[in-house]
Amino acid sequence: MPTNSPPQVPAAPEEDTAERRDAADRRDPDARRDAGQKVTGTARYAAEHTPPGCLHAVPVPATVARGEVTAVHADELLRRPGVQAVLSHTNAPRLGEAEDPTLALLQTARVPHRGWYVALVVADTLENARAAADDLRIEYATEEHDPGPPAGHPGLYAPEEANGGHPGLRERGDFDAAFATSAVRVDATYTMTAQHNHPMEPHAATAWWEDDALTVYDSSQGATKVRDVLAQLFQMPRHRVTVVSAYVGGGFGSKGTPRPQAVLASMAALHLGRPVKLALPRRELAAVVGHRAPTVQRVRIGADSDGVISALAHEVVTQTSTVKEFVEQAAVPARTMYTSPHSRTSHHVVALDVPTPSWMRAPGEASGMYALEAAMDELAVATGVDPVELRLRNEPDTEPDSGRPFSSRGLPECLRRGARLFGWEGRDPRPGVRRAGDRLTGTGVAASTYPYLLSPSSASAHAAPDGTHLVRLAATDIGTGARTVLARIAAEALDVPPASVRVELGSSALPRAPLAGGSSGTSSWGWAVHKACTALAGMVRAHSGPLPPEGLTARADTAEEAGRESPYARHAFGAQFAEVDVDTVTGEVRVRRLLGVFATGRVLSRRTARSQFIGGMTMGLGMALTESSTLDPAFGDFAERDLASYHVPVCADVPALEAHWIDEEDPHLNAMGSKGIGEIGIVGTAAAIANAVHHAVGVRLRDLPLTPDRLL
Ligand code: MOS
């Protein structure tokens, strides 16, 4: 099939040396092992591999909101120098059944939303491919499209399940009766526009076929999953597909599922018999790699005059696409947070002719805890109870929804310690009274939570006669420091210095491992690494004399441990405190301080943990103030499609963040005692900021983001 000499499959990158590890460990055992590679540019990302004969592909997005492709005028383009192929539903390789319908690419003429890929141009250079893609003329039969909005939409329905497999609806007691008879009632509706992940590295892949085997360098959060899905789509055994995600420039969920780049690059490489490279242009990401769905959330809380909650309803209205049902599980955290004898948590969704939403850092919790924690602030104002104290008064003995005991619940300690560190005591609760010139100042607090998730993983551990160790598994480092923390876990189990441990990850050819997602990577991979290393340590102890030249190897799999049902409700918790200034002339909100305290089990690596917490808090600041994707009803897709219009906070927006944590001993988790830390930092931040804005200006603004036009 290939017409040129096949490229070699490069070995997994050699990310560090014993000397470097020693030096790094002496400076700081938490220093990133791949830091040197990253700052010197030797860490190579998916689009930075150029096998000999590599072609460049550029995708062509649909320009209509709904309809069918009726003609693809490729003939003239194919006569241009350099253009190798124009793939569309008329000639693209046929794929097997896609479990994720967003990956059924170039298979039919159907256009489910604007931005959906309808063709792929492949040429010898990126410039030639891009020019041809720009000039490709496609005809459509258009149909009337439905862009929503979801609120009040006749197509709304109650889904069986929301994202994460949570039941769409849960009811306990009699909410309506309890709410009606409550002494104090809060009834508020909060809205959020869509948001996009926008990782620094766009979605990219380089793919080639060689002797019926497929190799793909892909920017993904999980090489094993991408490998399995490609094997299914191209109908081949898994062992003939290798996916390498050695270095990944962020994902935040948008690379947690296989994305179009891996499928399209593989299709083009198969069609042409040559390697093909494809990086999705940033302006197209908004339509094809998922987003946080817009939500309309009504929260009703009934309480007594002391603020003790008797009735709680969190009702979420959101949207998905016609391609696939994705339901932002925003009402789910209300099932865990506060005591509430009578409660209702529900989701309604409508399928529109718009791009498909998906995971964005703490899907569900980030949106839901904005609304719930803003409503708690409204309850604090209504009852005159201090917002920290109000939350403490509503601490449940067991998880309200499930009745299960908590494996650990650090929320009260986070709130108390945060209040102390932030200087909450003596806060004047009156809103709108702290003025300095044109500026009003306020402070706010919110709780955060994220579930403890765990997936089965496997790993191998090797002891060499020279005293070094090698740990291998198909984990992915999406920028979090996975290599560093896994080496520490291994070193602890082996009782050796971390510098003697090398960690090889980032390829599906390594022992099977789950994705970096759901804040579960370190716990899931780490348990398998710990188990393999514990077994290896036993083998080494049992071995008399020097190790054989080939060394000793142990393998472990945590399918059984991870599959066990826990009798406990397991969640991480946190408390976020914010201070803001609001400019009464320009309407601009500036965050002056942001302080979070988190309870996430045992923290395994201080520096990488802190980086996750403050990264999450920064993303929460964006959620509160700057990040917003506007669905344009005329076109049925998003208006903000670059970093000039989609405002990710820049350094000048972000004050010196403080992230703290409590030492939490929880024996009901895993061998390390760790909960997840990747997502909890974003949860609650937006509410803390919005509550501080209310405290500053005295007006309750319930629609995010709090841009100047909304303040004035
Ligand atoms: Mo995260 S949204 O689970 O990658």
Image (cartoon, helix red, strand yellow):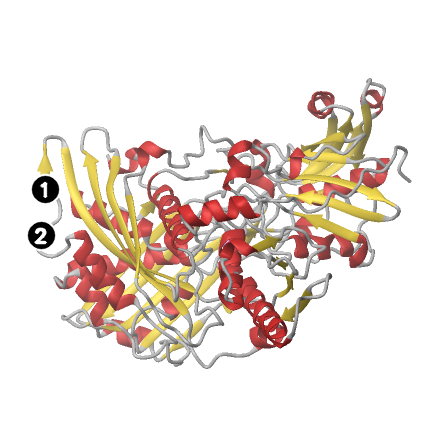
Question: Measured from the top left, where is residue 616 in percent x and y?
Answer: 39, 49
For the C terminus, the image quarter is: top left
Residue at 78 percent across and 24 percent down: it is 124
User: Mark 1 falls on what kind of element?
Assistant: loop
Q: Which mark is residue 434?
A: 1
Mark 2 touching mark 1, by CB under 8 A? yes
Residue 683 left/right relative to 194: left
Q: In this view, does 122 lie above or below 664?
A: above
Q: Is mark 2 within 8 Å of ligand 1?
A: no
Question: Measured from the top left, where is residue 84 in percent x and y?
Answer: 83, 27
Q: How crowded is mark 2: few (under 14 residues within 10 Å), some or many (20 or more)?
A: few
Residue 319 in sight from this viewpoint: no
For the N terminus, the image quarter is: top right
Q: Which residue is more in the foreground, 251 or 78?
A: 251
Residue at 62 percent across and 42 percent down: it is 113
Question: Measured from the top left, where is residue 389 in percent x and y?
Answer: 17, 65
Report the residue marked by disc 2.
428
Q: Is mark 1 within 8 Å of ligand 1?
A: no
Q: In this view, does 173 lie above or below 518?
A: below
Q: Which mark is residue 498?
A: none
Amino acid beneath label 2: Asp
